[in-house]
Amino acid sequence: MKKIYTFLIAFLVFAGTATAQIASWNISDPAFNALGDVATTTTVEGLTIYSEGNVTVDANNKSLDGVDYTHRLKLGGSGNFDEGGLPVSRVLAFDVTGNVSITIMCMSSSGSADRLLNVAAGGSAEENLLGAADALGASLTATTFQYTGDATTIYLWSPSSGVNIYNIVVEEPVVPTVVGFFAKEKAMFETAATIAEDPLLELLKADPNFTVVENILTSVAATDEHDLSAYDVLVVQESFGSGDGILTPDGALGLAKLNKPVLYNKSYAFKSGRALADGSAATGSEAPGLNITVDPANQANDLFKGITFDANNEAQLFLAPTNDDGDANAANSVKALNYAREVSISTESTLLAVPTNVTEGHVVSICINDIPEGTVVGGETLAARMVTVGYNTGAILANGGRNMTQEGLTILRNAMYVLAGKEVPAELAEYATTTSIGFEPRILDIYTSNGSVVINDCEGKNVEVYSISGTKVFGQAATSSVVTVPVPSGIYIVVVDNAASKVIVK
């Protein structure tokens, strides 16, 4: 019997960054909604509709992201191009002057069949494809593509059967914030996620607002050098040992050396001889509980945006306590939240949230804090803004990395948006839901070149490429031995018949 493995593709919900709109073609607008049957090729406000009497605009009510649509443009079938690659019918086209972000709201014309809408720059050939928008049968969906290059024409068409289009928006491109993600490699419990599967890391990697450089370290000496200049924002995760030299004042991740806004998750480092050098009595402690308490005056802070607090001003951040390795069922599984106490902080009112269950007599200095640049913390002057949290690594990674509540994940996501200077999403962060693709364990002959995924030895085989967010960006039977799929930077899953491999495009 053939053994089939299950390959999981994560679907993540993320917020877009506000960008300047360049053009928008809402089919519900008067310029479009009265077109009816489009008899010949027609241009409306810069959008060219290639038709031979087979494209139609009609009434249809749909809503997406708070926008109500009343009309749709029905392509009515597959797009047609002549032998020279020029559009003939069932194709939409518009010109762009350079780098843009393109968002398309569309759905399948069949309620029972999901379809795709090809998006290409400069022509219909395979090498021109930017990707394919999902056209689902059950719901209206928005897909965003990034085009980088010179002035060109963008073409949209269905490679197979009808797709209905409701809106096309062209904006200035998203400029992602470059995140330097620092963590220490460590072995985790068998049911826990690995350090490289940190849910915050997965969230950032799937969000087009961020580009992540992973620094999962095995050497953590004070003498190790790390250039932070390439990053816009930093993450220092809790998997480091609080006494690791890299976190000390002489280390590359010493508090005063973090010269970019940083999410700092290591409460136990706030101690003399560790991250601090002022000889104070500061130290870290575990909190025996899963909740934080936030004063009503702090609940409007963007770090808590999307979170609803209970009558006691509490929010639960974890599902269960664990040990440091992410085992929730061990005798020592008591960890989730931690904090630092007796830390001198020159700026007042930086503490925004505390663990609900704090050891009697302890005065919390650092748990969830927003500390401005220039603040002196335990004798160390911060070179940039710092948001601190007190999340145990085992608790973060337990249960396959799904032990945080949405509220716990939301605080991490919000912190990254705050530090990046981006508008914080209004909704709770969501974990990945998953879909499964069966595949045989096999190494595929794939590589990347000039912003493309190149798949070898695939003639006659079905080739599909998925983004890490679960969107199919390419899918067809290969007619040659080599298939080249242009894609934006990111992580992709390449599936050839029953085999799958992951590839990273820089």
Image: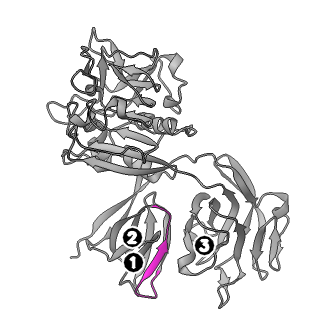
Q: What's the residue at 48%, 18% (across, down)?
A: 311
The three-letter amino acid code for the residue at tag 3 is Ala
The three-letter amino acid code for the residue at tag 2 is Val
Q: Is residue 138 above or below residue 430?
A: below
The three-letter amino acid code for the residue at tag 1 is Ile
Q: Is residue 10 above or below residue 296?
A: below
Q: Residues within 10 Å of mark 2 (few under 14, many from 20)?
A: many
- Which residue is disc 2 drawn over? 494
The extreme bottom residue here reads 83
Question: Nearer the N terminus, badge 1 or badge 2?
Answer: 1
Q: CA distance from mark 3 to mark 2?
A: 20 Å
Quadrant of the frame with the N terminus: bottom left
Q: Which residues are magenta?
A: 477-489
Q: Quick check: marks 1 and 2 in contact, CB under 8 Å? A: yes
The answer to whether residue 138 is seen in the rendering is: no
**Main secondary structure of the magenta stretch:** loop
- Which residue is disc 3 drawn over? 120
- Which element type, helix, strand or loop, lies under badge 1? strand
- Which residue is disc 1 drawn over? 455
Q: Nearer the viewer, residue 213 or 93?
A: 213
